[in-house]
Amino acid sequence: MRMNVFILLAAVFFGGLTLSAQTITDHENGKYSLSVGQVTLTVDASKGGKIISYRYDDKEILSQTRMPNSFGSTFWTSPQSEWNWPPVPEYDYKPFSAQIKDASLVLTGEKSPRFGYRVRKEFTANAKNQSIEITYTLINESGETRKVAPWEISRVPNGGILFFDAKEATPANNMKGLPFEYKMKAAWYVLDEDQNHRKINADGKGWLAFCDKGLLFVKKFPDLKPSEPAPAEAEIQIYANPGKTFVEIEEQGAYTTLNPGEELSWTVCWYLLPTDLPAEPSKALLKKALSVIK
């Protein structure tokens, strides 16, 4: 039996009263959905607490390819050099427990026996700005003092354009770079096809955006100083998989020392809205993205 939890919120807009209903739906197969307005985000607690869908009405923005590590949105620890590849099972695909607490969905993962971290993810729909707020918490249960940074990886189809505020994007992880353009106070990448693995690092300004097929997806997160990311990592990273497959839009938090029993929390806000603007560099598209996060 599917269970819906409705949260009715009142907000004042332009001197009037507007009622906005948020819904958390337990599909009872490990999947949960949060809805606010016309936006719905779905997670799979049984498979790493991954975000598997992010839709405006019936239009999907995340990659739905079902090859391993090619769809949805996940969370890892940084730097990658600590674990290399493949991703740590307890963060990426092992089951998370789920609890609906107040107006939030809280997912808690297993402790990694290799690294001693436990991951918690808290999803909250914000009716005021129609966003989904995601708070990732890393808990050090290792018995050792360790340094770590949070890292969100979201996969989108290879099409459209992505952009953010940065003066340069440098090749990363011994891969080829990406053909960014720098104009109108932003870095722009029109997604293209190549047979190589390609990745860049960039020092952003706390946001990035992706536009494709009439949807604008914007992320907002804490802006980092150039010295704050983990070694060889960056505030913003973009990875393009070979062929016409998928692209990862990624951001990281500050590299932080955690004593035994300590934890860090890091929040990313997701926004999704329709647009009739073309997926190409323009002042209008940049203005629309910036208006969302202010």
Image (cartoon, rainbow, N blue to C red):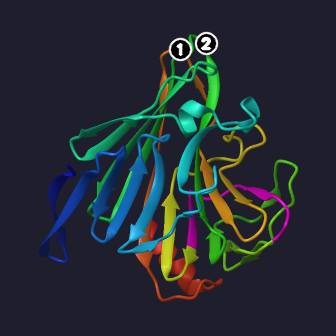
Q: Which mark is residue 122?
A: none
Q: Residue at x 19, y 77 (%)?
A: 14
Q: Disc 2 marks which amino acid?
A: Glu
Residue 21: % across, % down: 18, 63
**Could you say which quadrant of the image residue 101 lies in?**
top left
Q: Regarding mark 1 in the picture, which secondary structure is present there?
A: loop
Question: Eyeballing the image, is 214 above or below 22?
Answer: below
Residue 146: % across, % down: 63, 21
Crowding near the residue tagged with mark 2, few <14, some 14–19, many ≥20 C-alpha atoms within 10 Å: few
Residue 94: % across, % down: 51, 34
Q: Are marks 1 and 2 in contact (CB under 8 Å)?
A: yes
Q: Residue at x 71, y 74 (%)?
A: 191
Q: Which mark is residue 260?
A: 1
Question: Quadrant location of the C terminus?
Answer: bottom left
The answer to whether 202 appears left or right of 149 in the picture is right
Q: Disc 1 marks which amino acid?
A: Pro
Total tally of numbered discs in the picture: 2
Q: Regarding mark 2 in the picture, which secondary structure is present there?
A: loop
Q: Please state the extent of the stretch shown in magenta in the rendering.
A: 194-210
